[in-house]
Amino acid sequence: MPELTLAPEDWQAIALTAKLAAVTLSILFVIGVPLAWWLARTRSRLGSLVSALVAVPLVLPPTVLGFYLLVLLGPQGPVGRLTEALGLGLLPFSFPGLVVASTLFSLPFVVQPLQATFSAIGERMLEVAATLGAGPFDTFWHVVLPLSRPGLLSAAVLGFAHTLGEFGVVLMIGGNIPGRTQVLSIAIYNRVEAFEYAHAHLLAGGLLAFSFVALLALQFINRAGVGAPGMLRGGA
Amino acid sequence: MGRILLCLCCLAASLGAHAGEVLVAVAANFTAPMKEIAASFEGATGHRARLAFGSTGKLYAQIRNGAPFEVLLAADSETPAQLEALGLTVAGTRSSYAIGRLALWSPDPARVDAAGRVLADGSIRRLALANPQLAPYGRAAEQTLRALGLWQSLRARLVLAESISQSYQFIASGNVPLGFVALSQIVRGGALQSGSAWRVPDDLFGPLRQDLVLLRPGEHSPAAAALLRFMASPDAHRVLRDYGYEVPR
Amino acid sequence: MSGVEARFRLQREGFSLDVALGLPGSGVSVLFGPSGCGKTSVLRCAAGLTRADEGVMRIGEECWQDSGTGRWLPTHRRPLGYVFQEPSLFPHLSVRGNLAFAGKRCGRRDPPDGDLLELLAIDGLLDRMPSALSGGERQRVAIARALGTSPRLLLMDEPLAALDAPRKREILPYLERLHQELSIPVLYVTHALEEVARLADHLVLMEQGRVVMAGPVGEVMASLESPLAATDQAAVVVDARVSGHDASYGLTRLDVNGVELWTARVSCEVGHRLRLRIHARDVSLALFRPEGSSITNILPAVIEAIAGERAGDDAMQCLVRLRTASGARLLARVTRRSRDLLALEPGMVVYAQIKAVVPVI
């Protein structure tokens, strides 16, 4: 049995993965929070349409999604032509490309729990805030977000964990380039293909343990939040 | 957006700075030997090979959509030919770098006999192979079974894997007792690593030629040209044989 | 004196609202009617929570909305307090936090008004979370919070309806004290007559999205045309002053505009003002001053009008409106047979025998 230590390329992959998950999660929140809020509030038909679109990555096999993203963002694709015309170059096989892809495929994991939480808040709390002189943004910041804390946490953990673990889309759009687009899940795949199973187990075990701890922590925090309202204190 | 642009510029600059680097798209089933070859390539030439692994189909889709790969080492000969037809390669650079061999394998040392008679003795309940429509090794396995006249009788017992890697995993994990794999998956230093195997004779299936080609982004790269030469060197051939590949004539 | 003008037209599936209200600039105006009659809709329109198809909302010189000129202030820009039916405190904030939420947004940084907290008896609850409060406590905090915005108008939507009877009894006195302390107009929605009798200065009767009758509570309740007159609940409310106690009989003497009435002893000092409710079913009539009656309160009065006089009216009873010497009005429920036997008609002088006088405050 060879000695098991992580190679520099593994560390590279881990760092890249953490960076990807962090950047993606930030973007997901910037997009997902307003989107989920709109979806939770709107009564228009457009809402159902957007809801379905957001959920597409849940049903589409990742490689299929990856393939279409590749075509869309590639030199012949409409988005690719746009990014090139804007002087941004092409997104596939670059870190920004990974971020775009990760954001799209993790979107339902952030939007859906948020939407559920926002819907559960109900009209009354918003009306109360309005009668107390709070404008829409004020209400969202000081009433909706504090009341949505468990949902926000779920969304963050699910979005982060899902981005960490995704494989099919990032392999397709990123191209498995070490140091640039080779994330942890792909590094594991490489180890398997190279018959370096012990190494693969080590990386996969680490990923598994991390994800498990994150999800477990989420459970605890949510439970604590339900059991003791004092935990939710703060906000305004 | 400005930041993305900046990132891309830095990336481009850093790539330019390492003139002796080549980005190679490698068929997943060639991962292990290519890592060894890349190591000796770096030692021999001073150039660095950055390896990106993926199934040949995915690599094809990526190259068609602007992937920056400079060299492609495919698991078949059709893909490089198609890329050449699309004008995405540098003319006259396509050639075979290895010839694959097929084996019937089981982790059980007593399961497979040296002549492959186990296929016909009626004891097989499940047999793994790569999907013939997706993978060259799958097609070779189908050709073998047809040549032996066993395709019809075994057809209902076949477990199809999406790639030759998955076929190997089905068997190695014990979920399927035996099946067709690439010889390169079970041989090291020219010797069978574990279990029992039958090396399928070359006349039962069409040749498993694995071709490489220089892609457009590598057209003027000295490192890419060096890698192409190195793939035909005795050093590379030694690794190929080690992994059970045949060296192209 | 600045009044409240509220006019709303609203058409929804299966419901239409069309009201035009001119309400006094102080005191409690109660919107009363059966559920589904549009009371709450009026309140929501006034607050801007529902946007009427056409509407005008003015408080004195301030215009909050006028569909004629296109003026529209969203709810959060209207200086109002709103108390919802169910106590809707923010669960993530303590009582103090809930109160501060209101204060901060009307530009007040100082702690909540101590007098108000004391009046509503919530000064000891400031550090509790809403989940640790009783329903009654929550509603009191909600009222204090609504008043914490220094509103120009207080809107209360059945604030007692979600509470059980003991809780209602717990809160009503607070509302009555507020009634006496507040200088801003209050629009109060209820379908409980008890609350009307205790709180209303001005009464608006609503049915099916329309105003049926509106005016000072004494007049509306004494009207024979009001929907209330047709019910068993027909009653008048009169304001009285405690003028003395008779300790030996356990009675209290009341003065209603110079007319003397006796009631069971109430623990109020002489001079205290209180409100009485006199049900029509508790008033009977006699042509001559009864001698040797067990009834203490007997007043001479003139018949102003009689409801249910039409020929062919087959109701057993009719309602008689009386005017006492002091100008106070009474309602009496008598059978049609009695009416005919006594040949009652407007202008006659009769003697009203009042079986029960119920102080409501």
Image (cartoon, coloured by chain):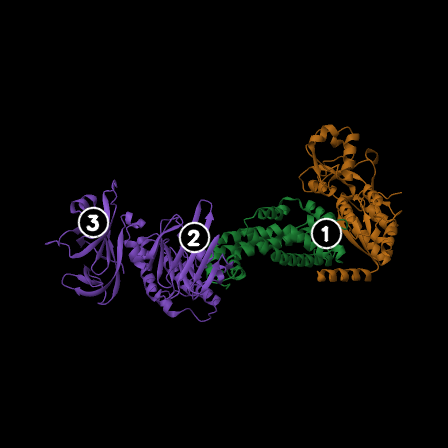
Chain colours: A green, B orange, C purple
The local secondary structure at tag 2 comes to helix
- The quarter of the rendered structure image containing the N terminus of chain B is bottom right
Q: Chain of mark 2?
A: C
Residue position marked by numbered label 1 in the rendering:
A79
In the picture provided, is A156 more to the left or to the right than B69?
A: left
Residue B129 locus on image (x, y percent)? 73, 37
Tell me how far mark 1 sits from mark 2, CA to CA.
Answer: 50 Å
Residue position marked by numbered label 2 in the rendering:
C41
Same chain for marks 2 and 3? yes
Q: Nearer the viewer, mark 2 or mark 3?
A: 3
Visible residue check, residue A191: no
Above or below for A129 versus B81? below
Tell which of C343 and C153 is nearer to you: C343
Dot 1 crowding, Cα within 10 Å, few <14, some 14–19, many 20+ = some
Same chain for marks 3 and 1? no
Name the residue type under label 1: Val
Residue position marked by numbered label 3 in the rendering:
C345
Dot 3 crowding, Cα within 10 Å, few <14, some 14–19, many 20+ = some
Please, which residue is most extreme toward the front here?
A: C347
Please, which residue is most extreme toward the bottom here?
A: C110
Tell which of C295 and C86 is nearer to you: C295
Q: For the residues labelled 2 and 3, say whether their Cβ atoms are less than 8 Å apart.
A: no
Dot 2 crowding, Cα within 10 Å, few <14, some 14–19, many 20+ = many
Same chain for marks 1 and 2? no
Residue B106 locus on image (x, y percent)? 72, 38
Q: Chain of mark 1?
A: A
Q: For the residues labelled 1 and 2, say whether their Cβ atoms are less than 8 Å apart.
A: no
